[in-house]
Amino acid sequence: MARTPLEADPRDLAALAEPLVLLPTKRRRLTAPNRIVYQPMEGNDAEPDGAPSEATFRRYRDRAAGRAGLDLVEAVAVSRAGRARERQLVLTAATRPAFEELVARYRRRNDATPLLVQLTHSGRFALDPVTPYPLPGTEARLLTDGDLLRIRDDLLAAVRLAYEAGFDGIDFKHCHGYLFGALLGPANRARPGWTHGGETLAERARFCRETLARMREIAPPDRFLYTVRLSAFEGIPGGFGSRDARSEEEDETRGELVAFCRMLEAAGVHLLNQTSGVPELTPLLVRQTRENPLGFFDHQERAEAMKRAVSIPVVGSGYSYASDGRNRLPGDRREKHLVALAGRALREGRVDLIGIGRQSLADPHFADKVLSGRLDEVRWDTACNRCADSLRSHRPVICHTYEGHLRRRE
């Protein structure tokens, strides 16, 4: 394999190229052909009804050509009221044909990578904001049991639609402050008429466990993947991973993180995907920038804690910041570029797969280039965070690295 200016260690490339059986099945697409995961990255470019637009089709056409080991379609709301933005994707009976077309176009370019769709309700950030516990200073309405059961029905309908549209599985989104993850935090206490909160994690995880059981009745778990992307620590008062209902400090024992991961494994989840933080409130926990480079190691430690807790595969996150080694992590550039750090984590057994978020926006062909030894051709993420700025401003997401490449090509 050709060497590059980054001097990639062949052992690192071999670790990234190793396939991983996600389900013991004869269906080829339920094996990840390599260890690179394209994370769900919102484009905010849907049609008014939430269907994929031509811009959406273009993005996933390019991701398909990247040939990642696993590809997670961005956060898709299970109802229009549950969107965080007017142009967020929504999976309903009306939009299902467009999602079926998205899968078909993806498969024409790539029939090997498992393609999953992340399902969400935006909770406090939704266009019709709702919250499982009081949030002073917000317009979010306090959820009732009836509200949550209606959301559950929308979610179950979306699982059926995803299965019928040809996706290989779903990601049940429990991260970044959105509704399903918010239910887990210690702030979700018991209150009159509210049966989905409580003092214990088991009480707060009731919706998740019961809904997973219903999902598995709709789409058979021996042919359909169930994954959960989880904010291991939200960094907000009463958020998941906090010491208690009033704290924003991390529980150093990580007791609830470990317990919840084991609950998910027992409930039949096939894979866990680590992340941290709430982008609107604790963005430096979510993604590394020049201001918080050492947050990369926090991601690694939390992913490793999850990996030690379960026997199912775990995806590690935060790797995009490492880029081509021109970062503020300690060490020599040859030792701290993305491929070196990712390969080492895999070889040492600290994670099973490597999650790539911003880097998949900067270069959708990233996985194919890396695995074919073409590191010198990769367009590296610059950690400018303009993609996040676009999303916060409710504009279609633009990666300046990628868009600059398209302009030069034209």
Image (cartoon, grey):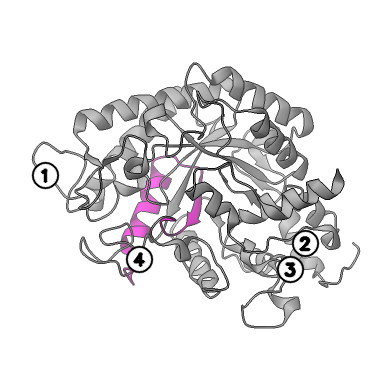
The answer to whether one can see residue 94 in this image is yes
- The amino acid type, in three-letter code, at marker 3 is Asp
Figure check: 212 above or below 231: above
Disc 4 versus disc 2: distance between alpha carbons? 32 Å
Mark 3: few, some, or many residues within 10 Å (few <14, many ≥20)? many
Q: Secondary structure at mark 3?
A: loop
Q: Point out the frontmost of discs 2 and 1.
A: 1
- In the picture, measured across the screen, residue 86 lies left or right of residue 66, that is left
Q: Which residues, given as a range, are shown in magenta? A: 250-279
Residue highlighted by disc 4: 254
Q: Residue furthest bottom?
A: 331
Is label 4 in contact with label 2 (beta carbons under 8 Å)?
no
The first of marks 4 and 2 along the sequence is 2
Name the residue that disc number 1 marks.
191
N-terminal of the pair, mark 2 or mark 3, is 2
Q: Which residue is mark 2?
A: 13
User: Of tags 1 and 3, which is closer to the observer?
Assistant: 3
Marks 4 and 1 sit apart, C-alpha to C-alpha, by 26 Å
